[in-house]
Amino acid sequence: MTHPSDTGPAPVLALRDVAKSFGAVRALRGVTLELFPGEVHALAGENGAGKSTLIKALAGVHRPDTGQVLLDGAPVAFHGPGDARDAGIAVIYQEPTLFPDLSIAENIFMGRRPRRSLGRIDHRATRAATAGLMRRLGVALDPDRPARGLSIADQQIVEIAKALSFDARVLIMDEPTAALTGGEVARLFTVVRALSAQGAAVLFVSHRLEEIFAICSRVTTLRDGALVASEPLAGMTEDDLVRRMVGRDLDELYPKQEVTPGEVALSVRRLTREGVFTDVSFEVRCGEIVALAGLVGAGRTEVARAVFGVDRPDAGEVEVLGRALTPGAPSLAMAAGLALVPEDRRAQGLVTGLSIERNIGLTGLRATTRAGLMDRRAERDRALDWAVRLQVKYARLADTVNTLSGGNQQKVVLAKWLATAPEVLIVDEPTRGIDVGTKAEVHRLLSRLAAEGVAVLMISSDLPEVLGMADRVLVMHEGRLTAEIPRSAATEETVMAAATGRAAA
Protein backbone atom coordinates (compact mmCIF):
# COMPACT_ATOMS: atom_id res chain seq x y z
CA MET A 1 0.00 0.00 0.00
CA THR A 2 1.40 3.37 -0.98
CA HIS A 3 0.42 6.95 -0.67
CA PRO A 4 -1.23 8.28 -3.82
CA SER A 5 1.69 10.58 -4.46
CA ASP A 6 5.18 9.14 -4.68
CA THR A 7 6.54 12.52 -3.61
CA GLY A 8 4.08 12.88 -0.72
CA PRO A 9 5.00 12.90 2.96
CA ALA A 10 5.72 9.77 4.97
CA PRO A 11 2.86 8.41 7.14
CA VAL A 12 2.80 9.86 10.64
CA LEU A 13 1.10 6.74 12.02
CA ALA A 14 0.75 3.27 10.52
CA LEU A 15 -0.22 -0.32 11.24
CA ARG A 16 1.71 -3.13 9.55
CA ASP A 17 0.13 -6.60 9.32
CA VAL A 18 -1.57 -6.19 12.71
CA ALA A 19 -3.55 -9.12 14.13
CA LYS A 20 -5.57 -9.19 17.33
CA SER A 21 -7.70 -11.98 18.80
CA PHE A 22 -9.97 -12.22 21.83
CA GLY A 23 -10.23 -15.88 22.66
CA ALA A 24 -11.51 -17.64 19.53
CA VAL A 25 -12.63 -14.36 17.93
CA ARG A 26 -10.13 -12.94 15.42
CA ALA A 27 -10.92 -9.22 15.55
CA LEU A 28 -8.09 -8.13 13.22
CA ARG A 29 -6.32 -10.30 10.68
CA GLY A 30 -3.16 -8.86 9.18
CA VAL A 31 -4.44 -5.29 8.75
CA THR A 32 -2.24 -2.53 7.30
CA LEU A 33 -3.17 1.15 7.50
CA GLU A 34 -1.31 4.40 6.83
CA LEU A 35 -2.33 7.86 8.05
CA PHE A 36 -0.68 10.85 6.36
CA PRO A 37 -0.41 14.43 7.64
CA GLY A 38 -2.94 16.80 6.13
CA GLU A 39 -5.29 13.97 5.09
CA VAL A 40 -8.78 13.00 6.27
CA HIS A 41 -8.89 9.20 5.95
CA ALA A 42 -12.12 7.21 6.33
CA LEU A 43 -12.37 3.86 8.10
CA ALA A 44 -15.37 1.92 6.80
CA GLY A 45 -16.90 -1.46 7.55
CA GLU A 46 -19.92 -3.15 9.02
CA ASN A 47 -20.41 -3.53 12.76
CA GLY A 48 -18.08 -6.30 13.85
CA ALA A 49 -15.65 -5.66 10.99
CA GLY A 50 -12.85 -4.72 13.40
CA LYS A 51 -13.00 -0.91 13.34
CA SER A 52 -13.19 -0.47 17.12
CA THR A 53 -10.32 -2.90 17.69
CA LEU A 54 -8.21 -1.07 15.11
CA ILE A 55 -8.90 2.27 16.80
CA LYS A 56 -7.96 0.84 20.18
CA ALA A 57 -4.72 -0.55 18.75
CA LEU A 58 -3.81 2.91 17.48
CA ALA A 59 -4.84 4.52 20.78
CA GLY A 60 -2.84 2.19 23.02
CA VAL A 61 -5.86 0.43 24.55
CA HIS A 62 -5.00 -2.91 22.88
CA ARG A 63 -1.55 -4.24 22.02
CA PRO A 64 -1.40 -6.23 18.76
CA ASP A 65 -0.78 -9.96 19.00
CA THR A 66 1.37 -9.72 15.87
CA GLY A 67 2.39 -6.92 13.55
CA GLN A 68 3.64 -3.42 14.30
CA VAL A 69 2.45 0.07 15.12
CA LEU A 70 4.76 2.62 13.45
CA LEU A 71 5.13 6.24 14.51
CA ASP A 72 7.03 8.40 12.01
CA GLY A 73 8.23 5.18 10.41
CA ALA A 74 9.68 3.66 13.62
CA PRO A 75 8.10 0.75 15.55
CA VAL A 76 6.51 1.81 18.83
CA ALA A 77 4.83 -0.09 21.66
CA PHE A 78 2.10 1.78 23.51
CA HIS A 79 1.59 0.44 27.02
CA GLY A 80 -1.63 2.37 27.48
CA PRO A 81 -3.70 5.31 26.22
CA GLY A 82 -1.39 7.70 28.05
CA ASP A 83 1.56 6.62 25.89
CA ALA A 84 -0.46 7.16 22.71
CA ARG A 85 -1.64 10.57 23.90
CA ASP A 86 1.89 11.61 24.75
CA ALA A 87 2.88 10.55 21.22
CA GLY A 88 0.29 12.94 19.78
CA ILE A 89 -2.61 10.53 19.14
CA ALA A 90 -6.07 11.54 20.34
CA VAL A 91 -9.45 9.81 20.03
CA ILE A 92 -12.67 11.85 19.85
CA TYR A 93 -15.55 9.56 20.76
CA GLN A 94 -19.22 9.79 19.82
CA GLU A 95 -20.17 10.62 23.42
CA PRO A 96 -17.78 13.12 25.07
CA THR A 97 -16.89 12.65 28.73
CA LEU A 98 -16.53 16.08 30.32
CA PHE A 99 -16.83 17.15 33.95
CA PRO A 100 -20.17 18.98 33.85
CA ASP A 101 -19.54 21.32 36.79
CA LEU A 102 -16.17 22.53 35.55
CA SER A 103 -15.61 25.23 32.96
CA ILE A 104 -14.51 24.57 29.39
CA ALA A 105 -11.00 25.78 30.26
CA GLU A 106 -10.81 23.58 33.36
CA ASN A 107 -11.93 20.54 31.35
CA ILE A 108 -9.30 21.14 28.67
CA PHE A 109 -6.42 21.57 31.10
CA MET A 110 -7.59 19.18 33.81
CA GLY A 111 -4.60 18.10 35.94
CA ARG A 112 -2.08 20.30 34.09
CA ARG A 113 -3.26 23.89 34.41
CA PRO A 114 -0.57 26.60 34.17
CA ARG A 115 0.80 27.66 37.52
CA ARG A 116 2.37 30.74 38.98
CA SER A 117 5.10 30.94 41.53
CA LEU A 118 4.42 29.05 44.75
CA GLY A 119 2.37 26.56 42.76
CA ARG A 120 -0.82 28.62 42.46
CA ILE A 121 -3.02 27.99 39.42
CA ASP A 122 -2.77 30.72 36.79
CA HIS A 123 -6.43 31.15 35.83
CA ARG A 124 -5.69 33.94 33.39
CA ALA A 125 -3.14 31.83 31.49
CA THR A 126 -5.60 28.89 31.43
CA ARG A 127 -8.34 31.06 29.94
CA ALA A 128 -5.93 32.63 27.43
CA ALA A 129 -4.67 29.23 26.28
CA THR A 130 -8.25 27.98 25.87
CA ALA A 131 -9.24 31.08 23.90
CA GLY A 132 -6.23 30.48 21.61
CA LEU A 133 -7.35 26.91 20.95
CA MET A 134 -10.88 28.08 20.13
CA ARG A 135 -9.51 30.66 17.70
CA ARG A 136 -7.45 27.93 16.05
CA LEU A 137 -10.63 25.89 15.61
CA GLY A 138 -12.61 28.90 14.43
CA VAL A 139 -15.23 28.44 17.17
CA ALA A 140 -16.57 31.05 19.60
CA LEU A 141 -16.91 29.31 22.98
CA ASP A 142 -16.40 31.15 26.29
CA PRO A 143 -13.55 29.47 28.25
CA ASP A 144 -15.39 30.20 31.52
CA ARG A 145 -18.65 28.60 30.44
CA PRO A 146 -19.55 25.46 32.44
CA ALA A 147 -19.60 22.20 30.50
CA ARG A 148 -23.07 21.43 31.83
CA GLY A 149 -25.63 22.43 29.25
CA LEU A 150 -23.27 22.33 26.28
CA SER A 151 -24.66 20.61 23.20
CA ILE A 152 -23.03 17.37 22.09
CA ALA A 153 -21.50 19.33 19.21
CA ASP A 154 -19.90 21.87 21.55
CA GLN A 155 -18.71 19.09 23.87
CA GLN A 156 -16.94 17.49 20.91
CA ILE A 157 -15.28 20.81 20.09
CA VAL A 158 -14.01 20.92 23.69
CA GLU A 159 -12.63 17.38 23.30
CA ILE A 160 -10.89 18.38 20.06
CA ALA A 161 -9.43 21.46 21.77
CA LYS A 162 -8.20 19.21 24.59
CA ALA A 163 -6.49 16.98 22.03
CA LEU A 164 -4.81 19.98 20.42
CA SER A 165 -3.59 21.14 23.83
CA PHE A 166 -1.59 17.90 23.93
CA ASP A 167 -0.11 18.80 20.52
CA ALA A 168 -2.01 15.94 18.88
CA ARG A 169 -0.86 15.18 15.35
CA VAL A 170 -3.35 12.36 14.78
CA LEU A 171 -7.06 12.72 15.54
CA ILE A 172 -9.26 9.63 15.46
CA MET A 173 -12.93 10.59 15.25
CA ASP A 174 -15.22 7.67 16.11
CA GLU A 175 -18.79 8.28 14.88
CA PRO A 176 -18.56 11.98 15.80
CA THR A 177 -21.74 13.01 13.95
CA ALA A 178 -24.17 10.37 15.22
CA ALA A 179 -25.98 12.76 17.59
CA LEU A 180 -25.51 16.01 15.64
CA THR A 181 -27.91 18.09 13.57
CA GLY A 182 -27.14 19.06 9.98
CA GLY A 183 -25.82 22.48 11.00
CA GLU A 184 -23.64 21.00 13.72
CA VAL A 185 -22.20 18.46 11.26
CA ALA A 186 -21.33 21.29 8.86
CA ARG A 187 -19.50 23.16 11.64
CA LEU A 188 -17.63 20.02 12.68
CA PHE A 189 -16.54 19.46 9.08
CA THR A 190 -15.24 23.04 8.92
CA VAL A 191 -13.12 22.30 12.01
CA VAL A 192 -11.88 18.99 10.55
CA ARG A 193 -10.86 20.68 7.29
CA ALA A 194 -9.03 23.38 9.24
CA LEU A 195 -7.13 20.77 11.26
CA SER A 196 -6.10 18.81 8.18
CA ALA A 197 -5.00 22.06 6.50
CA GLN A 198 -2.78 22.64 9.55
CA GLY A 199 -1.12 19.26 8.98
CA ALA A 200 -3.07 16.95 11.28
CA ALA A 201 -3.83 13.39 10.17
CA VAL A 202 -7.51 12.61 10.75
CA LEU A 203 -9.03 9.12 10.83
CA PHE A 204 -12.78 9.53 10.37
CA VAL A 205 -15.18 6.70 11.27
CA SER A 206 -18.82 6.98 10.22
CA HIS A 207 -21.67 4.78 9.04
CA ARG A 208 -23.05 7.71 7.05
CA LEU A 209 -21.60 7.17 3.61
CA GLU A 210 -22.51 10.66 2.39
CA GLU A 211 -20.30 12.10 5.14
CA ILE A 212 -17.36 9.92 4.15
CA PHE A 213 -17.57 11.20 0.58
CA ALA A 214 -18.01 14.79 1.76
CA ILE A 215 -15.02 15.05 4.11
CA CYS A 216 -12.51 12.29 3.27
CA SER A 217 -10.00 11.81 0.47
CA ARG A 218 -9.10 8.15 1.10
CA VAL A 219 -10.86 5.16 2.63
CA THR A 220 -9.72 1.93 4.24
CA THR A 221 -12.41 -0.77 4.29
CA LEU A 222 -12.48 -3.73 6.69
CA ARG A 223 -14.62 -6.84 6.48
CA ASP A 224 -14.61 -9.61 9.11
CA GLY A 225 -11.40 -8.24 10.61
CA ALA A 226 -9.47 -8.26 7.34
CA LEU A 227 -8.37 -5.46 5.04
CA VAL A 228 -10.45 -5.25 1.86
CA ALA A 229 -8.88 -2.15 0.30
CA SER A 230 -7.22 1.18 1.05
CA GLU A 231 -7.78 3.58 -1.83
CA PRO A 232 -8.71 7.11 -2.94
CA LEU A 233 -12.41 8.02 -2.83
CA ALA A 234 -12.15 9.94 -6.10
CA GLY A 235 -14.07 8.03 -8.76
CA MET A 236 -15.83 5.73 -6.26
CA THR A 237 -19.58 5.63 -5.71
CA GLU A 238 -21.53 4.80 -2.56
CA ASP A 239 -22.52 1.50 -4.19
CA ASP A 240 -18.84 0.69 -4.72
CA LEU A 241 -18.08 1.29 -1.05
CA VAL A 242 -21.09 -0.70 0.12
CA ARG A 243 -19.97 -3.62 -2.05
CA ARG A 244 -16.55 -3.56 -0.39
CA MET A 245 -18.08 -3.36 3.09
CA VAL A 246 -20.64 -6.15 2.82
CA GLY A 247 -19.05 -8.28 0.10
CA ARG A 248 -22.11 -8.14 -2.15
CA ASP A 249 -24.47 -5.76 -3.85
CA LEU A 250 -27.01 -4.37 -1.39
CA ASP A 251 -30.36 -5.20 -2.97
CA GLU A 252 -32.25 -2.30 -1.48
CA LEU A 253 -31.61 -0.06 1.51
CA TYR A 254 -35.26 0.94 1.91
CA PRO A 255 -37.31 -2.18 1.04
CA LYS A 256 -40.71 -0.64 1.74
CA GLN A 257 -43.64 -2.93 0.98
CA GLU A 258 -46.92 -1.38 -0.15
CA VAL A 259 -49.62 -2.20 2.42
CA THR A 260 -53.26 -1.14 2.71
CA PRO A 261 -53.61 0.23 6.26
CA GLY A 262 -56.18 -1.39 8.51
CA GLU A 263 -57.95 -0.20 11.65
CA VAL A 264 -56.51 2.40 13.98
CA ALA A 265 -54.02 0.66 16.28
CA LEU A 266 -52.59 3.65 18.16
CA SER A 267 -54.56 6.80 18.89
CA VAL A 268 -52.96 9.76 20.66
CA ARG A 269 -55.22 12.69 21.50
CA ARG A 270 -54.13 16.09 22.81
CA LEU A 271 -51.14 14.66 24.69
CA THR A 272 -49.39 17.36 26.71
CA ARG A 273 -46.45 17.49 29.08
CA GLU A 274 -45.87 21.00 30.35
CA GLY A 275 -42.66 22.56 29.07
CA VAL A 276 -41.87 19.57 26.84
CA PHE A 277 -44.64 19.10 24.24
CA THR A 278 -48.17 20.44 23.78
CA ASP A 279 -51.44 19.21 22.26
CA VAL A 280 -49.98 16.30 20.26
CA SER A 281 -52.57 14.23 18.39
CA PHE A 282 -52.10 11.53 15.76
CA GLU A 283 -53.08 7.99 14.74
CA VAL A 284 -51.16 4.98 13.45
CA ARG A 285 -53.06 2.22 11.66
CA CYS A 286 -52.32 -1.49 11.45
CA GLY A 287 -49.82 -2.08 8.63
CA GLU A 288 -48.60 1.53 8.59
CA ILE A 289 -45.13 2.87 9.19
CA VAL A 290 -45.51 6.42 10.44
CA ALA A 291 -42.35 8.46 10.93
CA LEU A 292 -42.06 11.08 13.66
CA ALA A 293 -39.48 13.54 12.33
CA GLY A 294 -37.97 16.81 13.53
CA LEU A 295 -34.77 18.37 14.76
CA VAL A 296 -32.97 17.25 17.91
CA GLY A 297 -34.85 18.68 20.90
CA ALA A 298 -38.22 18.91 19.11
CA GLY A 299 -39.82 16.55 21.65
CA ARG A 300 -40.14 13.36 19.58
CA THR A 301 -38.54 10.98 22.10
CA GLU A 302 -40.45 12.61 24.95
CA VAL A 303 -43.75 11.96 23.15
CA ALA A 304 -42.81 8.30 22.67
CA ARG A 305 -41.92 7.94 26.35
CA ALA A 306 -45.25 9.48 27.38
CA VAL A 307 -47.20 7.25 24.98
CA PHE A 308 -45.52 4.14 26.43
CA GLY A 309 -45.97 5.39 30.00
CA VAL A 310 -42.32 5.92 30.98
CA ASP A 311 -43.17 9.60 31.60
CA ARG A 312 -46.57 10.65 32.85
CA PRO A 313 -48.27 13.29 30.68
CA ASP A 314 -50.16 16.21 32.22
CA ALA A 315 -53.09 15.84 29.82
CA GLY A 316 -54.29 13.78 26.90
CA GLU A 317 -55.28 10.22 26.09
CA VAL A 318 -53.61 7.20 24.49
CA GLU A 319 -55.52 4.21 23.12
CA VAL A 320 -54.30 0.92 21.66
CA LEU A 321 -56.92 -0.80 19.48
CA GLY A 322 -59.61 1.26 21.20
CA ARG A 323 -58.43 0.43 24.72
CA ALA A 324 -57.45 3.43 26.83
CA LEU A 325 -54.05 3.19 28.51
CA THR A 326 -53.44 4.24 32.10
CA PRO A 327 -50.98 7.18 32.07
CA GLY A 328 -47.54 6.43 33.46
CA ALA A 329 -47.95 2.62 33.46
CA PRO A 330 -45.51 0.89 31.06
CA SER A 331 -46.48 -2.60 32.25
CA LEU A 332 -50.11 -1.97 31.30
CA ALA A 333 -49.00 -0.54 27.95
CA MET A 334 -47.04 -3.75 27.29
CA ALA A 335 -50.06 -5.85 28.26
CA ALA A 336 -52.16 -3.86 25.78
CA GLY A 337 -49.73 -4.69 22.95
CA LEU A 338 -47.38 -1.69 22.93
CA ALA A 339 -43.59 -2.04 22.63
CA LEU A 340 -40.87 0.64 22.77
CA VAL A 341 -37.35 0.24 21.37
CA PRO A 342 -35.55 3.20 23.00
CA GLU A 343 -33.10 5.62 21.41
CA ASP A 344 -30.19 4.79 23.74
CA ARG A 345 -29.94 1.02 23.43
CA ARG A 346 -27.06 0.64 25.90
CA ALA A 347 -28.48 2.78 28.71
CA GLN A 348 -32.20 2.02 28.27
CA GLY A 349 -32.57 -1.05 26.09
CA LEU A 350 -30.01 -3.50 27.47
CA VAL A 351 -28.64 -4.78 30.76
CA THR A 352 -25.05 -4.96 29.61
CA GLY A 353 -23.89 -7.24 32.42
CA LEU A 354 -26.41 -9.92 31.54
CA SER A 355 -26.19 -12.55 28.80
CA ILE A 356 -27.67 -12.28 25.32
CA GLU A 357 -30.35 -14.85 26.14
CA ARG A 358 -31.28 -13.15 29.40
CA ASN A 359 -31.63 -9.75 27.68
CA ILE A 360 -33.92 -11.19 25.01
CA GLY A 361 -35.93 -12.91 27.71
CA LEU A 362 -36.49 -9.88 29.94
CA THR A 363 -39.88 -9.08 28.40
CA GLY A 364 -41.04 -12.69 28.67
CA LEU A 365 -40.34 -13.55 32.29
CA ARG A 366 -43.94 -14.56 32.90
CA ALA A 367 -44.00 -16.82 29.86
CA THR A 368 -40.81 -18.61 30.92
CA THR A 369 -41.57 -18.93 34.64
CA ARG A 370 -43.06 -22.10 36.08
CA ALA A 371 -44.30 -22.17 39.70
CA GLY A 372 -42.19 -19.13 40.48
CA LEU A 373 -39.02 -20.63 39.01
CA MET A 374 -37.31 -19.64 35.78
CA ASP A 375 -37.49 -22.28 33.07
CA ARG A 376 -33.98 -21.79 31.68
CA ARG A 377 -34.57 -24.07 28.72
CA ALA A 378 -37.68 -22.13 27.69
CA GLU A 379 -35.74 -18.88 28.02
CA ARG A 380 -32.88 -20.26 25.92
CA ASP A 381 -35.23 -21.60 23.24
CA ARG A 382 -37.03 -18.27 23.05
CA ALA A 383 -33.73 -16.38 22.76
CA LEU A 384 -32.34 -18.78 20.15
CA ASP A 385 -35.50 -18.50 18.06
CA TRP A 386 -35.29 -14.70 17.89
CA ALA A 387 -31.52 -14.62 17.50
CA VAL A 388 -31.90 -16.83 14.40
CA ARG A 389 -34.83 -14.82 13.03
CA LEU A 390 -32.92 -11.53 13.29
CA GLN A 391 -29.57 -13.06 12.27
CA VAL A 392 -27.74 -11.92 15.41
CA LYS A 393 -24.01 -12.64 15.14
CA TYR A 394 -22.68 -14.05 18.42
CA ALA A 395 -20.35 -16.70 19.78
CA ARG A 396 -22.59 -18.08 22.57
CA LEU A 397 -26.01 -17.01 23.84
CA ALA A 398 -24.52 -17.16 27.34
CA ASP A 399 -22.01 -14.40 26.50
CA THR A 400 -22.72 -10.95 27.93
CA VAL A 401 -24.50 -8.64 25.52
CA ASN A 402 -21.67 -6.08 25.68
CA THR A 403 -19.50 -8.49 23.67
CA LEU A 404 -21.67 -7.79 20.61
CA SER A 405 -21.19 -5.08 18.01
CA GLY A 406 -23.56 -2.11 18.03
CA GLY A 407 -25.69 -3.48 15.21
CA ASN A 408 -26.11 -6.84 16.92
CA GLN A 409 -26.95 -5.14 20.22
CA GLN A 410 -29.70 -3.29 18.36
CA LYS A 411 -30.99 -6.62 17.05
CA VAL A 412 -31.10 -7.98 20.61
CA VAL A 413 -33.19 -4.99 21.73
CA LEU A 414 -35.53 -5.55 18.78
CA ALA A 415 -35.72 -9.28 19.56
CA LYS A 416 -36.60 -8.54 23.18
CA TRP A 417 -39.62 -6.49 22.15
CA LEU A 418 -40.71 -8.46 19.10
CA ALA A 419 -40.90 -11.54 21.31
CA THR A 420 -43.90 -9.86 23.01
CA ALA A 421 -45.82 -9.99 19.67
CA PRO A 422 -46.76 -6.29 19.86
CA GLU A 423 -49.70 -4.69 18.08
CA VAL A 424 -47.86 -1.35 18.04
CA LEU A 425 -44.08 -1.03 17.81
CA ILE A 426 -42.41 2.30 18.61
CA VAL A 427 -38.79 2.41 17.43
CA ASP A 428 -36.68 5.43 18.37
CA GLU A 429 -33.68 5.96 16.02
CA PRO A 430 -33.70 2.27 14.98
CA THR A 431 -30.54 2.45 12.82
CA ARG A 432 -28.40 5.04 14.62
CA GLY A 433 -24.80 3.92 14.83
CA ILE A 434 -25.20 0.71 12.83
CA ASP A 435 -23.65 -0.17 9.50
CA VAL A 436 -25.32 -0.02 6.12
CA GLY A 437 -25.80 -3.79 5.81
CA THR A 438 -27.48 -4.10 9.22
CA LYS A 439 -29.48 -0.95 8.46
CA ALA A 440 -30.97 -2.64 5.41
CA GLU A 441 -31.85 -5.69 7.54
CA VAL A 442 -33.62 -3.52 10.13
CA HIS A 443 -35.55 -1.72 7.38
CA ARG A 444 -36.56 -5.07 5.86
CA LEU A 445 -37.72 -6.24 9.29
CA LEU A 446 -39.85 -3.12 9.87
CA SER A 447 -41.38 -3.45 6.42
CA ARG A 448 -42.18 -7.13 7.02
CA LEU A 449 -43.76 -6.37 10.42
CA ALA A 450 -45.98 -3.72 8.83
CA ALA A 451 -46.98 -6.16 6.11
CA GLU A 452 -48.01 -8.57 8.89
CA GLY A 453 -50.28 -5.91 10.37
CA VAL A 454 -48.12 -4.35 13.07
CA ALA A 455 -48.48 -0.59 13.44
CA VAL A 456 -45.01 1.00 13.47
CA LEU A 457 -44.19 4.47 14.82
CA MET A 458 -40.59 5.24 13.79
CA ILE A 459 -38.69 8.19 15.24
CA SER A 460 -35.72 9.07 13.06
CA SER A 461 -33.30 11.94 12.43
CA ASP A 462 -32.15 10.27 9.21
CA LEU A 463 -34.11 12.02 6.46
CA PRO A 464 -33.43 9.40 3.75
CA GLU A 465 -34.70 6.76 6.19
CA VAL A 466 -37.85 8.78 6.90
CA LEU A 467 -38.54 9.33 3.20
CA GLY A 468 -37.68 5.75 2.25
CA MET A 469 -39.69 3.91 4.89
CA ALA A 470 -42.67 6.00 6.01
CA ASP A 471 -46.25 5.88 4.72
CA ARG A 472 -46.83 9.20 6.46
CA VAL A 473 -44.48 11.70 8.10
CA LEU A 474 -45.43 13.59 11.25
CA VAL A 475 -43.12 16.53 11.90
CA MET A 476 -42.48 18.20 15.26
CA HIS A 477 -41.05 21.62 16.01
CA GLU A 478 -40.48 22.91 19.54
CA GLY A 479 -42.88 20.47 21.15
CA ARG A 480 -45.73 20.76 18.66
CA LEU A 481 -46.80 18.83 15.58
CA THR A 482 -46.35 21.21 12.66
CA ALA A 483 -47.22 18.96 9.71
CA GLU A 484 -48.58 15.61 8.57
CA ILE A 485 -47.17 14.75 5.15
CA PRO A 486 -48.27 11.77 3.03
CA ARG A 487 -45.56 9.65 1.42
CA SER A 488 -46.34 11.06 -2.03
CA ALA A 489 -45.63 14.63 -0.89
CA ALA A 490 -42.74 13.97 1.50
CA THR A 491 -39.43 15.46 0.38
CA GLU A 492 -36.39 16.73 2.24
CA GLU A 493 -37.64 20.26 1.59
CA THR A 494 -41.18 19.73 2.92
CA VAL A 495 -39.99 17.86 6.01
CA MET A 496 -37.26 20.38 6.87
CA ALA A 497 -39.64 23.30 6.33
CA ALA A 498 -41.98 21.82 8.94
CA ALA A 499 -39.12 20.85 11.26
CA THR A 500 -37.87 24.45 11.33
CA GLY A 501 -41.34 25.90 11.91
CA ARG A 502 -41.81 27.27 8.40
CA ALA A 503 -44.83 25.13 7.51
CA ALA A 504 -48.36 25.65 8.70
CA ALA A 505 -49.82 23.02 10.99
Image (cartoon, rainbow, N blue to C red):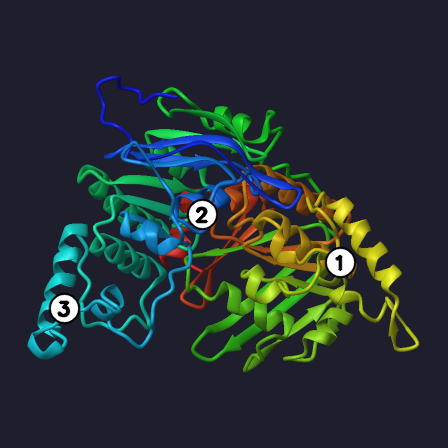
Q: Is residue 490 visible?
A: no
Residue 114, numbered label: 3
> Circles 3 and 2: CB distance less than 8 Å?
no
Kindly identify the amino acid type of the residue bearing the numbered disc 3.
Pro
Mark 1 lies on residue: 357
Report the quarter where the C terminus lies: bottom left
Placement of 304 over or under 10, stated as above or below: below
Q: Position of residue 315 (x, y in %)?
A: 56, 81
Q: Nearer the viewer, residue 72 or 99?
A: 72
Could you classify mark 1 by the number of other residues whose Cα lies within 10 Å: few (under 14), some (14-19), or many (20 or more)?
Answer: many
Could you classify mark 2 by the number of other residues whose Cα lies within 10 Å: few (under 14), some (14-19), or many (20 or more)?
Answer: some
Which is closer to the viewer, label 1 or label 2? 2
Kindly identify the amino acid type of the residue bearing the numbered disc 2.
Lys
Q: Is residue 498 visible?
A: yes
Mark 2 lies on residue: 56
**Residue under the image location 75 percent in, 53 percent down:** 397
**Residue under the image location 54 percent in, 46 percent down:** 434
